Image (spheres, coloured by chain):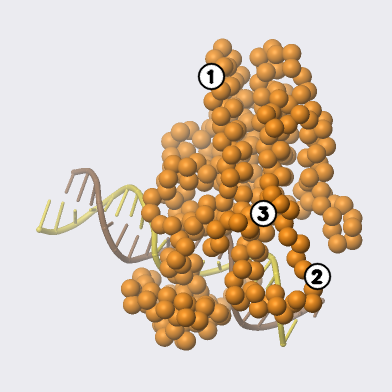
Chain colours: A orange, B yellow, C brown
Amino acid sequence: MGRSPCCENVGLKRRTWTPEEDQKLLAYIEENGHGSWPALPAKAGLQRCGKSCRLRWTNYLRPDIKRGKFSLQEEQSIIQLHALLGNRWSAIATHLPKRTDNDIKNYWNSHLKKRLTKMGIDPVTHKPKSDSLNPGQVKVAATLSHIAQWESTRLEAEARESTLLRSFSSSSAQLVLNKANALPPLQPPPLPLQPLCLDVLTACKGAWLTTLLKENGSTITGTLEAPTSTLNFSDKQLLIRNLGKSNNNNGEVKESMDNTVLVSNFMEGLTDLFIENSHDHLEHDLNDFEENNNYWNNILNLVNSTSPSIDSPVF
DNA sequence: AACTCATGCAACCGCGGCCGA
DNA sequence: CTCGGCCGCGGTTGCATGAGT
């Protein structure tokens, strides 16, 4: 493939944006919108390529960007979302209002990755460095991995939907929308926008709890004792399978999972971690139980609270 | 004070996808 | 269907700055 460079200053030294350049770019966009990026520099009187201008605007000048230190909650969100979504920074960014993908990526690479490594957790797989599972644990981990894969797909789709909604809110996209107003109106998203994943994550949590209790000699078998669910495990599996399917234009049902190549080892890793911990420390399972239960609740809360909706702040 | 090294992050590159001609 | 332009994304680079010696 390959493309010709978009600007003539390729190979030259990087040039930091000056306050004057920022001012020019800001003033131009505020007055005219960015329009076509390649055409913008000439119109705005900037000796930059369009790509550079776009980057400067999206990562720095946009008025709705939050800069500065990441809060503890944001850090947790990044770690958890990275575990689910991998290096899909833009998707992660849709769940962190006012943070740019570049900002998150930099923060991950310079801070969080190192911190996880220090903790003995592989920042890529989110697995603890040493792992040894028995066959039963492997089975559950595989199931949860499958579930997590679906969840990754969903989060990604959600991110795409969010982007679409944002783009439709912009003036230029509105023009496109107006041009296409002969088309059937867009269906509003179902309200409330309760993420479907909630049940899946709940299922994950439930599956983990079940395993833990089994490991601990509990008599509880198939029922997932998750707070928001009364489905048994086979019901969950059915639900998950159905959620993983989608209708294409021909009305055929196909497995959307098959079309996704996603790196989502988080659940697996997390499960490994939890299961391993519980296996190794059955004697203090109560503590583990409480701690891990809280962790799952955190994830559920996170996804619940940060799922993009039309009410989400517009970037 | 001067130098080196490490770190953070802004800026850039190149690829893939989308869309219109 | 193909081609070319544009956009968005993830990975990488390199500058600025602070810490350490």
Question: Which sits in the foreground, A147 or A289?
Answer: A289
Q: State the SS at label 3.
A: helix
| Residue holding disc 2 | A184
Q: CA separation, marks 1 and 3?
A: 35 Å
- Residue sitting at x 52%, y 54%: A97
For badge 2, the amino acid type reads Pro
User: On screen, A12 above or below A261?
Assistant: below
Which badge, 2 or 3, is on the more N-terminal residue? 3
Pinpoint residue A151: horizontal percent, then vertical percent: 69, 44
Question: Which sits in the foreground, A124 or A144?
Answer: A144
For badge 3, the amino acid type reads Glu
Q: State the SS at label 2.
A: loop
Q: CA separation, marks 2 and 3?
A: 22 Å
Q: Chain of mark 3?
A: A
| Residue holding disc 1 | A287
The numbered mark at residue A158 is 3
Quarter of the picture holding the N terminus of chain A = bottom right
Work out whether residue A15 can be spotted.
no
Quarter of the picture holding the C terminus of chain A = bottom right
